[in-house]
Amino acid sequence: MRVLVGDDTAVQTRAEQSRIRTTRQPQCTVEVVSDSGEGAQKCGQTFGAVSAKMGNGVWTVEIIPAEIQPPPRSPAGASGNRIRIGEGVVTNWGDRTNVAIAFNEQVLLARHRLDAIEEDAILLVENMWATHKDEDIRAEWAAAMDELGQANYRIIEVPMEEECLTIVENARKGKNMFALGILCWIFDRDMEITREQIAHAFRKKDPEITERNHELLELGYSWADSHLDVRIDVTPGLSPENTLVMNGNQAIAYGAVAAGMDLAAMYPITPATSVSHQLGEMFYKFGGVVHQAEDEIAAVGVALGASYSGKVAFTITSGPGLALKTEFLGLSVMSEIPLVLVNVQRGGPSTGLPTKVEQSDLLAALFGQPGDAPHVVMAPATIEECFHSMITARRIAETFRTLVMVLTDANLATGVQPFPRPTLDPAWQGSLPDMSPVPEGKAPYDWDEETGLSRRFIPGTPGGMHTLTGLAHDENSKVAYASAINQKSSAMRSRKMAVLQSTLRPPVVHGPESGDLLIVGWGSTKGAIEEAVDRAREEGLSASSLHLRFLSPLEPGLKGIFGRFKKVMTVEINYSDDPDMPYITDENRRRGQLAWLLRAQTLVDVDCWTRVLGEPLQPGAIHDVIRANVSKGGAA
Amino acid sequence: MPSDMTTDERASGALRVLEKACEDYHSALVATSEELRSLLDAGSATAEARAGRTAAELGAFAVGHIDIEKFAAFERTGEPVAVTEAPRLEAASRTLLSLLEHGNDLYYVNVDPGADLRDAVARGLGRAGRAFGAARTVELARSGKYDEATHGGWTDSFPPTLWSRREKQLAPPLVVEVDGADLRPGGLADFLDGEQKIVLVVRGVAPPAALARLITPGLLVVQTENPADLGAVAEAAGPAIAALVPADACHFTHSPAADGGRGRLVVRHMPTEEPKRPLGSLSVFQQTEAMRHLAALAAGWGLSAPETTAPSGDGASVPAPAASAADNLAAWILRQADISGMG
């Protein structure tokens, strides 16, 4: 059904308001899409934050074009936000969109062609293009509406431009808040919270801008109240008290401050940069330095140097930057200087897909350093875990005098989720560095023969003077000339990983401890995988999942757990060959990166299902994979 | 009642406004104290206590993924505290604990009538700053660099002149009650650095523009009758000073954060008459000079104020013509400087 606003038969009067239908839904997915620079992301972010503050579960995902400024009104240029809200906790972005609001028909068409929109979705679209003076644009509009009209969507044309011009001279600067007003009406959002959120978003601008945006919000709300006939009730079921709402990059920054980190050295790179923006605001208050170096190599060098001097330092990067940092990462391992590196994964290789999510850096993170460079690799699975992982990473790096890589991804980095406000603990800031005089005879690499651990000598420690070197060295940090020295020091560095592994607990299985199919994941896919497993189990399928936080060393007990399932497969956002494709054999098939690792470590025939679509995995797609691999009678 | 207890409701209100800064400092005290305690206890700590500490240090991400007791077994406890260091560390720990026993009075100083304001503020900051002295004592003792002759008194008083840049970022706020007759704030400039916040609660008659002399490009200066104006001090990024003064004094805000000249200095009230009597040791000339200074700055940056009569140097009031207050003041200053004939 199509409602043409402006058509007298479709415009509702007050008397008709009684016909407004409110549908209650446990969860609903909303998209706001526009050309770049029209503010759809601000609209979506604000809607998500308001929903979280009202007590809805929320997960947001940014829709970002590959280019910074793509041509206007092009399907490839769709920019915006997808917001999934629920009565309870929401752990992933869901499957398809139920309500979309678009600033032109081309970006809407792009979402339609990507199969991102639910069959019965409500689509609100700016209608100024229908009567545009440019004949080509009118033709594009007509063609797009024709194509969209083939589906079963409910399309509502909205005179955004016309309405916004009653308040602002440039409607491009106002449509996002007008759209927010419409969404607030449809979902019955608390307008006071919304006004506060807008004021917060524009707190650094002239107060007049906030005022204009408030007016646009009210205008959109009022327009919806007069013209729309459907409202959606996603009742907030969570307590908004003591809840934080932030994205993963912000959580990393907050976690770094909570962990007592003094210095973040970085070079701008999408999608990691905003960690440093957040830190720039916070370090000023709490003490600390964000150092923007001249390049990725210098950034890790600065962080390593600061750590050597006794500071708590970390560096932030994304795929291409990780490649550039390789040499210094090796130095961290060799010289046993604690260092935390956060790698916000994006699509690759090379510059790849800067704004899109992938989990393709796992093997590079594990094995990317030439020579034998054992170190720790961790992967938080939620935005809340992004915060807490920084505290743990610092402690492990210092206790084991090693490099700790924290792998997040673009999905976590830009997604927004509410989580309980952590109760800050001063112990997170760690202990004072041990600068007590070095006892006579102690050496800078006085390795415990059993554990490989040794005391860290910080410059300035009485009796601790030594020459730091990246060359193979003995206990005294003297360059190795004897053949056995490199064997021993390599063993000591490797032993530390074994010692850390001995302190790890076996992972907890989501679902029954045995059965037909075990899905194994890591990083940001946890929510989607577990939702898919839950759906499959509701259908009577025998499926469970397991999510790893430690990739190096690997969590213990995996072989035993895998042995209790008929089939084990990983689900990942990286590339693997489809076994049915030409030339692909079991011998040459390239598998998902975690699958590769698990097969090597456990000798279990771990299968995989992976996608590199530049977007998070959908629970529905994973559900289909489970169905395909498990029949009701057992594993396929 | 101890002399350093708040007697003025305005002082209590000022402490409430600065509550967050007080809490931040208190939190730093707690963290430092706990860290030191764990260092002192490290040698004698039970495995259970060590595991508890390790669990806290590893944080929530470790829950369910790391066996804390096993991990704790690999934590270095540091070199045992040497017999010679222990007394220094214990003294530092006692200092931190004694500071923690204070409530908000740690951030409050009462200046006895006739006493020197600068000395009293230095004493107040030096008292709260003992925390920095204690932390430094620990570092020096642990690194074998402690020298009794140089560092001996740091746990008793650690004045701001010894604070590092980082310590000044953590500076404890201070609310100071002082008689108007003793309001000579010029010496306080020495302490206004880092994140230092000072609020002066002025008793009785006050010189009209005492804080005007503190106006410098990067310093938030507020002189007001209205306690609500103190919020700017609490929120300031950087050092800030405010004075709660009587209604008949000058009321102004100098805000470095304000964009451009206009709005940087907002004078809300300027007395219609210049001072006629000395106040304490402040002569009429000195009080008048402060007003002139404020007027000159306001004229230079653009005054936002109710219509006023500017003070004149010879004691005569200049009636305000119909032009704007800013123009009046600018014209008056030009007359005083006698530069009108310059080409």
Image: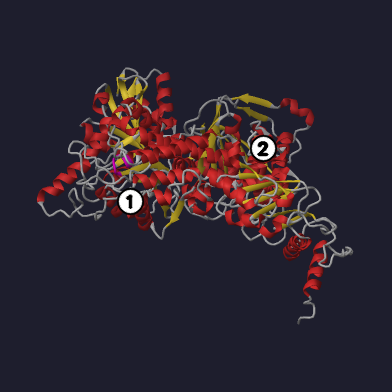
Main SS of the magenta segment? loop
- The answer to whether residue A121 is above or below residue B343 is above
Residue A215: % across, % down? 72, 44
Tell me which residue sits at (49%, 53%) in the image. B162
| Residue type at numbered disc 1 | Tyr
Q: Please, which colouring scheme is shown? A: secondary structure
The vertical placement of A634 against A322, above or below, is: above
Of the pair A354 and B40, the residue shown nearer to us: B40
In magenta, the rendered stretch is: A398-402
Checking the image for residue A308, the label placed there is 1
Element under disc 1: helix
Coordinates of residue A35 in the picture (x, y in percent): 57, 50
Q: Residue A246's spot in the image, x, y percent?
A: 52, 39
Front one among B225 and A313: B225
| Residue topped by disc 2 | B6
Subunit under mark 2: B
Tell me the quarter of the picture where residue A299 sits: bottom left
Say above or below: B334 vs A439.
below
In which quarter of the view is residue A100 placed? top right
Q: Dividing the picture into quarters, in which one does residue B50 lie?
A: top left
Q: Is residue A567 or residue B148 the one in the foreground?
A: B148
Label 1 packing within 10 angstroms: few (<14), some (14-19), many (20+) = many
| Residue that extends furthest to the bottom in the rendered view of this protein | B343
Q: Amino acid at mark 2?
A: Thr
